[in-house]
Amino acid sequence: MIDVSHDELARVVRDHAGRLAASLVHLIGDFTAAEDLVQDAVEAALRHWPADGIPDRPDAWLYTVARRRGLDLLRRDAAHRSKLALVVWTTQPDPADQLRLIFTCCHPALPRTAQVALTLRVVCGFTTGQIAKAFLVPESTVGQRITRAKRKIANAGIPYRVPADDELGHRLAEVLSVVYLLFNEAYLPTTADPNHGRDLADDAEFLAATLHNLMPTEPEVTGLLALIRLHRARTAARFDKQGGIIQLPDQDRTLWNQQTIADASMLIANAAARRRPGPYQLQAAIVACHAEASRWEDTDWTQILVLYDMLLHLAPSPVTRLHRAVANRYVTGPTAALDDVDTLADTLGGYHLFHATRAELLRDLNRLDEAHAADEQALAMTANPAEQSLLRQRLNWA
């Protein structure tokens, strides 16, 4: 067996499986049949490449296996067989095919869990077992989600196409939200497995970069890619050796990837030049304010507060108001920030970060018993091991 790292194998499969699926769906017009062919090829690669080595042309290898398998399976179907026989693998990908595939997987008629599972499997080349492991659900559950999604696409006649201009805004937002959901799961995973978050973060960045390559003039796509890269630039400083969270003020900023931060900031500038601001661009700009500060004390909180006000104007949400209150703590003071937070009690009372934020503000005001009670509420509401550890330290339970 040669030395083929799992990461490299996963990267090769991910880079080529989506393009192959897009090409087959476009040609034979049957989403389920095409997706099954690609999945068979990907699973064959996962079996053979670690032992035989990655072929010189992995994309052509996947294509050959998928086409051969397809001809076997479709032997009785003259229509599919004749179309599949015409498939010719080219070295030049068709961006439109990949876009159609991503938009179909993220169609709003599908439940969010199905959108995520289908995107990971078809676009990123995950096996059903890998998706199940990533989200800590039984493999049979993932299989059912994928089967129902494909049946829904066929029965509802969901078109395999990029949305028309008049519906692109909503549909693109749906696609971006799926990618961001994947990244959020990676950024603060619900499992202690360190590989869990890293793999999903890789794939979220891959999907965002793919969309950016396919739609370079869409500023929100650029904003999402910048947002993900800015967060990832700080990865090396976010956790201690025991997996505990290191909060932003305490992070070693020499561990941040300054080249990635500079590149992401350039992406934000390019998106802003198109004068179509959106939530992802504004979130990226907020993270950039933190990333570009050489010290915690140099953070431009006034600018961050302005950006949160713009974000609330475009996409109002209680969680954004909570984050704005944190920024307001450093501009106006903890009393005003606590007033802001307390107005959110009815809507965010079941959210652990509401109570954790409130606890910090109460500590600033020396209301220690109330802060302790708020941290206890936060601890009872989170399943994330790193967050639990941090809250226990605050409560002196560690």
Image (cartoon, helix red, strand yellow):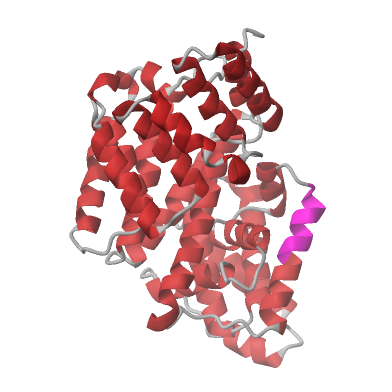
The one of 67 and 120 positioned closer to us in this rendering: 120
Q: Nearer the viewer, residue 147 or 34?
A: 147
Q: Position of residue 306 (x, y in %)?
A: 27, 44
The answer to if 364 sits in the magenta stretch is no
Q: Residue at x 62, y 38 (%)?
A: 351
**x then y, percent, for residue 358:** 53, 27
Residue 142 belongs to magenta span: yes
**Taking 205 as reference, is 149 above or below it?**
below
Instruction: State the extent of the magenta-drawn residues as a range.
Output: 138-146
Residue 36 appears in the figure: yes
> Would you say 39 lies left or right of 214 here?
right
Left or right, residue 48 beside residue 325 = right
Identity of the residue drawn at 62% across and 44% down: 346
Q: Position of residue 361 (x, y in %)?
A: 47, 23
Magenta segment's dominant SS is helix
Q: Quadrant of the C terminus?
A: top right
Which residue sits at x=27%, y=67%?
217
Between 391 and 51, the one nearer to me in the picture:
391
